[in-house]
Image: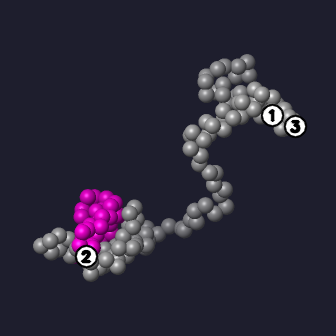
Amino acid sequence: MPEIVITVANKEKLDKGGFKITDTLGDEYILSVKNAGLENQLVIGRAATITPFKSTYGVFINSAELFDGKPPEDKQVEKITAGVGVEQQKAYAPQEVGMWWKELGECIRAGNIEVDFPQSAVSIRSQYYKKMFGITGIKTKED
């Protein structure tokens, strides 16, 4: 069989020491104990170029390497370096965001904002209420 490119969906260790590899199409391949050193080239979620061969026991992987992702020459595009020059904002869990909104609301109601941030207390308070009114659907004269 010729070389093919697969995307590894699952990798399961077999009792006799090899691995059963399943691709995203549901096709199964066996990585024998003899070729178990290729296991690090078959990463779940990544594409790999493999050379399979059929036997009476199934389809075995004879060679494997991570796919470099280069499209054919006529489909080449300019390289883009991800994240360079772009500041990435950390994604917070919704529970954490809710916790901080609750904490801010308690600080505003207790009057701590005026003490801790006297220069920006009015701005913080108005931003907080504007966001809360937007979420709850309360209309104000400013809207």
Q: Secondary structure at mark 2?
A: loop
Q: Is residue 16 left or right of residue 8?
A: left
Cα gap from disc 1 to disc 3, whole angstroms? 10 Å
Range of residues picked out in magenta: 1-30
Location of residue 37 with respect to 43 vertically, above or below: below
Cα gap from disc 2 to disc 1, whole angstroms? 65 Å
Residue 3 in sight: no
Q: Earlier in the sequence, mark 2 or mark 1?
A: 2
Mark 3 vs mark 2, foreground winner is 2
Whether residue 33 appears in magenta in the rendering, the answer is no
Mark 1 vs mark 3, foreground winner is 1
* Other-residue count near label 2 (Cα within 10 Å), few / some / many at <14 / 14–19 / ≥20: some
Q: Which residue is mark 3?
A: 119
Amino acid on which the number 2 mark rests in the picture: Ser
Q: Which residue is mark 1?
A: 113
Magenta stretch: dominant secondary structure: strand
- The structure residue drawn at horizontal position 26% and vertical position 68%, both measured from the top left corner, is 14
* Other-residue count near label 3 (Cα within 10 Å), few / some / many at <14 / 14–19 / ≥20: few
Amino acid on which the number 1 mark rests in the picture: Ile
- The structure residue drawn at horizontal position 77% and vertical position 34%, both measured from the top left corner, is 124
Between 76 and 127, the one nearer to me in the picture: 127
